[in-house]
Image (cartoon, rainbow, N blue to C red):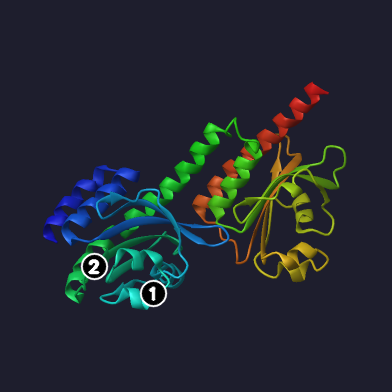
């Protein structure tokens, strides 16, 4: 492992995808694994991983995405603890298709956490043979030395993905347009069950109009264009607050909202959108089945998304006036 430690010093000048891929390549060379990956955790209606760098049988796994359910990966991210299986990993996780199909015998799942202690990714290694404690301890020491850097690179990749999407704008061939784009990016950023973007009705300030609504990765087209009243909904707090949260008990707090009882929602986050003069022009809302946590990165990116939503609402109004 001494050679690996020396080689990894060369990573100091590399960033992003290049850093992750080089780390994976060097670790594979020394550890002689049959499967290796650095993956980003993405949460919508269920936990999913997207491989940012990895190999399996000499084939690249970059951008490969899969569900975490029934896998040792899920155990690692739920517990935020190392999962280490020296032998018979297929027996321990019989419903993991990858383990069964590829014939893996041993496995390491190392959860990657950000500075706030949230698990945001996973380093995975697998062998078609048994491993020893001594062998794995040396590998884990190396991974531990670079875990914080890997976490930072995963967060940077996520931030750049969102910023690039905002800068590029919506796909002109898509019927969803920019409001779908913004809604999708808020959901991806927060990892929540559902998000909608809304405009304050220019005709009646007591109402808001839904511009885009995404739930569980699916667009609820029947909700788009609907006018809803602020009264009797948590959104009414955005009249006086820039942000309003309910971390649990959403259905109990608003028993008259049938949808809160039937949908898998327990938490709410609403963010008000103002114009340059401080007039409220809209808002976006996130729903989740667990508390919605935002730290520094999420807060900064939410501010960008909020401002973009406000800009697009005002541009939409201007276009409608010109066409009238």
Q: Is residue 253 left or right of residue 97?
A: right
Which residue is at the front of the view, 59 or 302? 59
Kindly give the residue lying farthest to the left in the view shown.
Answer: 3
- The residue depicted at 56 percent of the width and 57 percent of the height is 44
Residue 324 % position (x, y): 83, 23
The answer to whether residue 7 is seen in the rendering is yes
Determine crowd level at label 2: few under 14, some 14-19, many 20+ residues with C-alpha closer than 10 A: some
Is residue 295 positioned above or below 258 on the image?
above
Q: Which residue is mark 1?
A: 93
- Check residue 128 in the rendering and tell me which mark sits there, or answer none: 2
The quadrant in which residue 14 appears is top left
Label 1 sits on a secondary structure element that is loop
Q: Quadrant of the N terminus?
A: bottom left
- The residue depicted at 28 percent of the width and 60 percent of the height is 35
Q: Tell which circle, 2 or 1, labels the residue nearer the N-terminal end.
A: 1
Residue 287 % position (x, y): 66, 59
Is residue 4 positioned above or below 289 on the image?
above
Q: Is residue 92 left or right of residue 229?
A: left
Residue 49 % position (x, y): 44, 57
Is residue 163 positioned above or below 268 on the image?
above
Determine crowd level at label 1: few under 14, some 14-19, many 20+ residues with C-alpha closer than 10 A: some
- The residue depicted at 29 percent of the width and 69 percent of the height is 107
């Amino acid at each position: 492992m001494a050679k690996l430690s020396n080689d990894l010093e060369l990573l100091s000048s590399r960033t992003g995808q290049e850093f992750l891929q080089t780390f994976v390549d060097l670790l594979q060379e020394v550890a002689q694994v049959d499967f290796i990956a650095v993956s980003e955790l993405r949460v919508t209606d269920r936990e999913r991983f997207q491989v940012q760098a990895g190999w399996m049988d000499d084939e690249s796994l970059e951008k490969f995405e899969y569900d975490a359910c029934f896998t040792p990966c899920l155990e690692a991210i739920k517990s935020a603890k190392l999962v280490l299986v020296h032998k018979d990993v297929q027996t321990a996780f019989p419903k993991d298709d990858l383990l069964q199909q590829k014939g893996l015998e041993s496995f390491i799942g190392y959860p990657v956490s950000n500075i706030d202690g949230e698990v945001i990714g996973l380093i995975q290694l697998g062998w078609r043979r048994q491993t020893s404690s001594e062998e794995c301890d040396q590998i884990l020491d190396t991974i531990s030395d670079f875990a914080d850097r890997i976490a930072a690179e995963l967060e940077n990749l996520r931030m750049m993905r969102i910023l690039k999407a905002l800068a590029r704008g919506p796909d002109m061939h898509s019927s969803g347009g920019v409001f779908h784009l913004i809604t999708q990016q808020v959901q991806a950023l927060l990892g929540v069950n559902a998000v909608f973007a809304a405009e304050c009705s220019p005709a009646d300030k007591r109402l808001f109009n839904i511009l885009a609504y995404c739930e569980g990765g699916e667009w609820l087209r029947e909700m788009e264009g609907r006018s809803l009243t602020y009264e009797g909904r948590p959104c009414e707090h955005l009249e006086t607050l820039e942000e309003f949260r309910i971390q649990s008990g959403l259905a109990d707090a608003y028993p008259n909202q049938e949808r809160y009882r039937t949908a898998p929602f327990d938490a709410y986050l609403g963010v008000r959108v103002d114009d340059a003069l401080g007039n409220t022009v809209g808002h976006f809302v996130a729903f989740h089945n667990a508390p919605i946590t935002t730290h520094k990165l999420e807060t900064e990116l939410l501010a960008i998304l909020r401002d973009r939503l406000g800009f697009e609402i005002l541009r939409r109004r201007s276009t409608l006036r010109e066409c009238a």
